[in-house]
Image (cartoon, rainbow, N blue to C red):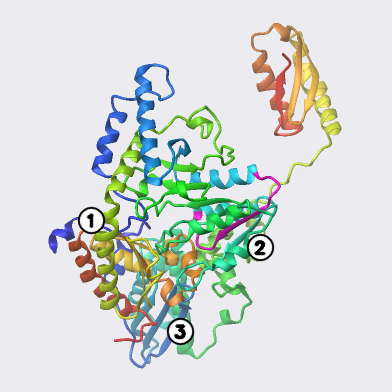
Amino acid sequence: MSSVNEKIVYMDNNATTMVAPEVVDAMMPYLTDLYGNPSSMHTFGGQVGQAVSGAREKVAHILGADPEEITFTSCGTESDSTAILSALRTLPEKRHVVTTRIEHPAVKSLCDNLETLTGHKYKVTRLKVDAEGMIDMGEYEAALTDDTAVVSVMWANNETGNIYPVEKMASMAKERGILFHTDAVQAVGKIPIDLQKLDIDFLSLSGHKLHAPKGVGVLYIKRGTLFVPFLTGGHQENGRRGGTENVASIVGLGRACDLAAENMENENSRVRQLRDKLEEGLLAAVPNSRLNGHKTLRLPNTANISFEFVEGEAILLHMNQHNICASSGSACTSGSLEPSHVLRAMGVPFTAAHGSIRFSLSVYNSEEEVDYIIEKMPPIIELLRKMSPFWKGK
Amino acid sequence: MWEYTDKVQQHFLDPQNVGEVENPSGTGDVGSLACGDALKLTLKVDENDIITDAKFKTFGCASAIASSSVLTEMVIGMSIDEAAKITNEDIAEALGGLPKEKMHCSVMGREALEAAIADYRGLILPMAEGEVVCECFGVTDLDIIRAINESNLRSVEEITNFTKAGGGCGKCEDRLREILRETVGGKSEVPPSVAKPKRMTALQKIKKIEGVLEKEVRPGLRKDGGDIELIDVDGDFVTVSLRGACKSCKKSQTTIKEYVEKKLRELVLDSLIVEEEN
C-alpha cells in the first residue's frame, strides 16, 4: 500500500477535478501560438473563433442541445445568476421564485438576496426535503402560482449526489408558463442529459467539475426563451455575454465534454462499483456510521457518510496525513459555525452532521485507492472517538 | 484550509492526557454536540490545592483538540489559584496562536477549566446565570461581556469568532452590537451606520447646484477670464457650458471633471456626473 501512500488519493471531485491530460493538450496551442482574438477580422483571429465554435458544438452535443443555445460564461455561479436574473427581467410583473433548501450557495445566496436586498419585492419558496434529501412533488405543484416567474432546482446535489426529477418538474412549470432553471454543475458528464426533449429553459454547467480548467462555465438557453444578458459589453456570444472569450479554457471544455461522453459508460459502471465498494466497506467497517442521501437516486460517484460522535475537520486532517482528499459538511469546514445547510434540511441529527465526510470519485480513481481508504478510515474514527466525550462504545 | 501552527498540529496529531481522571476532584463539562464542539475536563487535586493530574475528552475540530491537550499540560503542577488565572489568550498563546475564526476553541478550554475549578470548590458558576443572547449556541450576555473585556473585542464579527454568538441564525446580531456598545462605550470601533444622503427634490437639487456654481466655482474661473453656465440637471447628470477663456481652453474637460464635478460632489451630492454641453 505504500505506493499509494506517497501520492495523493483524490476523492474530492465534486469540489474540483483534475484537468484531463487530453484537455491540457487541446488547450496548449491557444495559450501559445494561437493567441488571436476570435472576434478579429483576420484569419489569425478567425481560426481561434473557429475553435470556439468547435467547442460550442461539443458542449451542445453532450447536452443534446443546439450550438446556438450554448453561451460560455466564467463559472457555474455566473450562469446561475444570469439565468435567474434574466427570467425575472423578462417577466417583470411576476415576483415569485421557487427553489429548494438544498441548492448550492450560488443559487441559495442569490435567492436570499432577491428577498432581502430588494426589500422583499420578491418572494421565494424553498421546497423542503425528506430525510433522504428528496423533494415532495405535491408540495412542488402547490408552490407554483400565477405569480411565479422562475423555478430553480439543481439536477444533482453536490453534497449527497442526490438526483432530482428536473425533467418532470420542468414540464410542470412549463404548463403554467413558468421558466425553469437547473444548476446541473454536478450532473453534466456523470449522467446522460438530452435537453432537446425537455422543457428546461436554462441549465448551468461548470468546466472544472468535468476535468476542464477553472474559470469557464456554460449557460444553456433554450431556443425561443427570452433572454436579458447579465454581463453587457461587446457582441461576443451573440450579444448574450460581453467580454473576450476565455478561448483556451473554452477549447478545453469542449474537449472535456467529448471525453465525458466517452467516459459516461465507465462513470456509470466502474466508478459506480468503486463508489459502492467504498461505501459498503466503510459502513461495514465503522460502527455508528450512516449514509446521507438517497440510496439509489444518486450520482454514481458520490458517497456522503457520517461517522457519529466525531467531528469532520478532525477526520479530514487525519485523512490528510495519509494524503487522502475529501470534504466534510461539518461546521468547522463549512466556513460558518453550523453544519451544512443540506444536511440540516434533511434533518440529519447533529451527532451525525458534524461528522459527515463526502467522498466524490472520478474515472481516475482505482480500486487500490478504494481499498487504501477502507483500510485507513476505521483507525482514524476510532482514535477520535476515544477522545470524544459522547462516544460510549468501546 | 486553516493555517495551523506546528504546535497546534503537534497537539492535534499527538494529543496529551486524553481520557478521564479516575475519581476526579473537579469536572468541567462544556459545549454540546449541537454546537459542534464539546470538552470534558477532569482534574485531580491534592490536599495542597495542587493539580496533580488533568485529562480531557474533546469532540471537535483540530484546534479544539489541540486547545484541550495544551490546557492539560499547562495546568498539571499548578495550584488551583494559579490555574484559575489562565485566560483563553494564554491557551491560544501556548499553541503559538490560533486562526481568529477558531479563537472560540481556546474560550471553550478556559470555560471547561473554570467549570472544573468551580466544581472542585463546590461553587456555582456565575456564567450560568446570565441572559441567553445567542440561542443557537447558548451564549449568555455574561459570556459575551467577559470575552469583550478579556480579549479586547471591538466588533460583532470578533465576538462571533471568540464566543460563537451570532454564528448561527444571526438574529441576535443587533443585541450583540448593543452589548458591545454598552461594554466598551466610546472605545467601540463599530462604524456608525453611514448617514444616508438626504433625498432632495429636483428643484432643491438645482438650486443647490446653482448656489455652489455661483459661490464656489465661478469666482475661480473668472480669475482666469472664463465663466460657467448651468444648462440642465437630469437626475444625476449635470450639463454645463463653459464660457469666455474656458471655452477655448484645451483643458476644459479637466476643469469640468477635476474642478466642477469634484466641487459639486463634495457640496451637493456625491453621485453627480458633470458633462459639458456639446
Q: Amino acid at mark 2?
A: Asp
Tell me whether the residue at label 3 lies in contact with that at label 1, contact meaning CB atoms closer than 8 angstroms: no
Nearest to the eye among marks 3 and 1: give it: 1
Is residue A96 one of those drawn in magenta?
yes
Q: Amino acid at mark 1?
A: Ile
Q: Residue at x 48, y 68 (%)?
A: A134
Q: Bounds of the magenta span?
A: A91-105
Label 1 to label 2: alpha-carbon separation = 46 Å
In the displayed structure, A84 sits above or below B95; it is above
Nearest the viewer among A115 and B236 is A115
Q: In the picture, which quadrant includes the C terminus of chain A?
A: bottom left
Q: Residue at x 60, y 56 (%)?
A: A112
Local SS, label 2: helix
Instruction: Name the residue that disc number 1 marks.
Output: A8
**Percent x, y for residue B48?**
38, 89
Q: Chain of mark 2?
A: B
Which class describes the residues within 10 Å of circle 3: few (<14), some (14-19), or many (20+)? many
Tell me whether the residue at label 3 lies in contact with that at label 2, contact meaning CB atoms closer than 8 angstroms: no
Instruction: Name the residue that disc number 3 marks.
Output: B117
